[in-house]
Image (cartoon, helix red, strand yellow):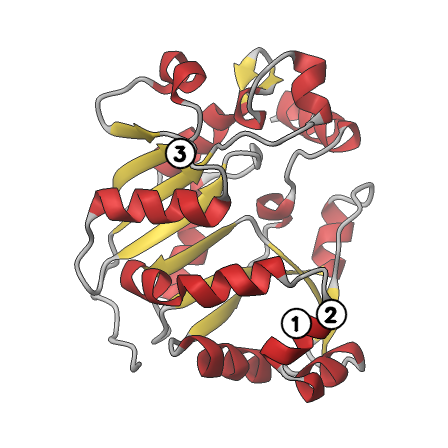
C-alpha cells in the first residue's frame, strides 16, 4: 500500500505501555506490581516518561495501558486515558488504537514506560527527523559507538549491517491504520523470534543468511519490511542512547539512578 505524505507539521497521539511483567526481579525488590512503578528518587519511573511526552510539541492524546488499579493514583489526570492491561504488547497497542479511533493518516507514537532517561528533546528529534520521509513505520536505531561512549557499562544486543553496528530504541512512530493492517504478521514475527527455522520461512532464508553474514544494508531491511507488511518502514538514526536504556535488571537500575541524581 502506498504511503501518503505527512502533514507539514506532524501531530500525533501517544501510547505509553505500562503492562505487568511476570516474575520481574525489580518489581519484587521494590514491591510493585508493574515495572512502571519502580521508583527513582521516590518517583515512579513512568512519571519521567510522562513528563517527556507531555513536553513534546505535537502531542494530542495520551493513552496509558496497564493495571488501572495501581496506576490511577499515580497518573490520574484529566488529559490522560488509562486502559486495562490486555496481557501482551500488541494486544495493548490494538486496544489503545481502537479507543483512539484514528483517521487513515493519523500517527501514533508508542513508547515503553521503562526508559526514564528520555526527554522531550529526544522524542522531538526522532519525530522531526521522521517527518522528512514518506513512510508509515519509523523506528530509532542507535550506533554501538554512541551507546558505549555515553554508557560504557551497559550491555546491549546489537545487530551489524553494512552501515555499522546498531541497537534499537524503545519507541516507534506508526501510522495507526498501518499497524492495525499489519498486526497479524507482526504477531507472527514476534512469536518466531526464538525459532530460526520459522523466522527464515517468514523472512526468507537468503535474507537471514545475508544478515548473519553482515552484508545487508539498512535500505534492504526496509525493502524487505515493505514486502512483508505492505507499508513503508524507515530506520531513523538517533544520537541519544537514553532511548534504549530500559530498566530490566539491577545493573540497569543503578546506572539510571546515578544519571538521574546528576541531572
Assess whether mark 1 and mark 3 are in contact (beta carbons under 8 angstroms): no
Classify 227 as above or below 58: below
Q: Percent x, y for residue 71? A: 42, 19
Assess whether mark 2 and mark 1 are in contact (beta carbons under 8 angstroms): yes
Pick whichever of labels 3 and 1 is earlier in the sequence. 3
**Which part of the image, by quadrant, shows the N terminus?**
bottom left
Bin the neighbour count of mark 3 within 10 Å (Cα to Cα): few under 14, some 14-19, many 20 and up.
Answer: many
Q: Percent x, y for residue 69? A: 40, 15
The quadrant where residue 217 appears: bottom right
Q: Residue at x 54, y 64 (%)?
A: 188
Q: Is residue 215 shown to the viewer in this render?
A: no
Mark 1 highlights which residue? 199
Q: Which dot, 3 or 1, sits closer to the camera?
A: 1
Whether residue 50 sits left or right of residue 80 in the image: it is right
Q: Is residue 127 shown to the viewer in this render?
A: yes
The quadrant where residue 143 appears: bottom right
Q: Residue at x 70, y 23 (%)?
A: 26
Pick whichever of labels 2 and 3 is earlier in the sequence. 3
Classify 29 as above or below 22: above
| Element at label 2 | helix
Nearest to the observer: residue 14 or residue 32: 32
Badge number at residue 65: 3
Badge number at residue 196: 2
Distance from disc 2 to disc 3, alpha carbons, whole Å, reads 31 Å
Assess whether mark 3 and mark 2 are in contact (beta carbons under 8 angstroms): no
Q: Residue at x 58, y 59 (%)?
A: 190
| Element at label 1 | helix
Amino acid at each position: 500500500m502506498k504511503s501518503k505524505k505527512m502533514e507539514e507539521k506532524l501531530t500525533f497521539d501517544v501510547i505509553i505501555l505500562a503492562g505487568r511483567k511476570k516474575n520481574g526481579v525489580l518489581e519484587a525488590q521494590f514491591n510493585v506490581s508493574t515495572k512502571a512503578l519502580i521508583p527513582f528518587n521516590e518517583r515512579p519511573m513512568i512519571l519521567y516518561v510522562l513528563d517527556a511526552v507531555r513536553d513534546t510539541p505535537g502531542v494530542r492524546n495520551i493513552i496509558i495501558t496497564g493495571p488501572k488499579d495501581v496506576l490511577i493514583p499515580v497518573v490520574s489526570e484529566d488529559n490522560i486515558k488509562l486502559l486495562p492491561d490486555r496481557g501482551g504488547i500488541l494486544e495493548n497497542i490494538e486496544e489503545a488504537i481502537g479507543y483512539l479511533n484514528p483517521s487513515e493518516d493519523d500517527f501514533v507514537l508508542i513508547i515503553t514506560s521503562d526508559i526514564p532517561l528520555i526527554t522531550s528533546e529526544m522524542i522531538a528529534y526522532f519525530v522531526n527527523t521522521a517527518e522528512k520521509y514518506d513512510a508509515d513505520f519509523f523506528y530509532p536505531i542507535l550506533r554501538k559507538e554512541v551507546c558505549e561512549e555515553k554508557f560504557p557499562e551497559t550491555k546491549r544486543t546489537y545487530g551489524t549491517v553494512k552501515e555499522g553496528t546498531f541497537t534499537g530504541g524503545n519507541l516507534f512512530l506508526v501510522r495507526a491504520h498501518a499497524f492495525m493492517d499489519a498486526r497479524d504478521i507482526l504477531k507472527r514475527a514476534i512469536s518466531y523470534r526464538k525459532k530460526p527455522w520459522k523466522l527464515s520461512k517468514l523472512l526468507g532464508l537468503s535474507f537471514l543468511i545475508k544478515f548473519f553474514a553482515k552484508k545487508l544494508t539498512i535500505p534492504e531491511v526496509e525493502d524487505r519490511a515493505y514486502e512483508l507488511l505492505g507499508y513503508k518502514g524507515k530506520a531513523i538514526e538517533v544520537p541519544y542512547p537514553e532511548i534504549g536504556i530500559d530498566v530490566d535488571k539491577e545493573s540497569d537500575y543503578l546506572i539510571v539512578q546515578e544519571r538521574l541524581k546528576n541531572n
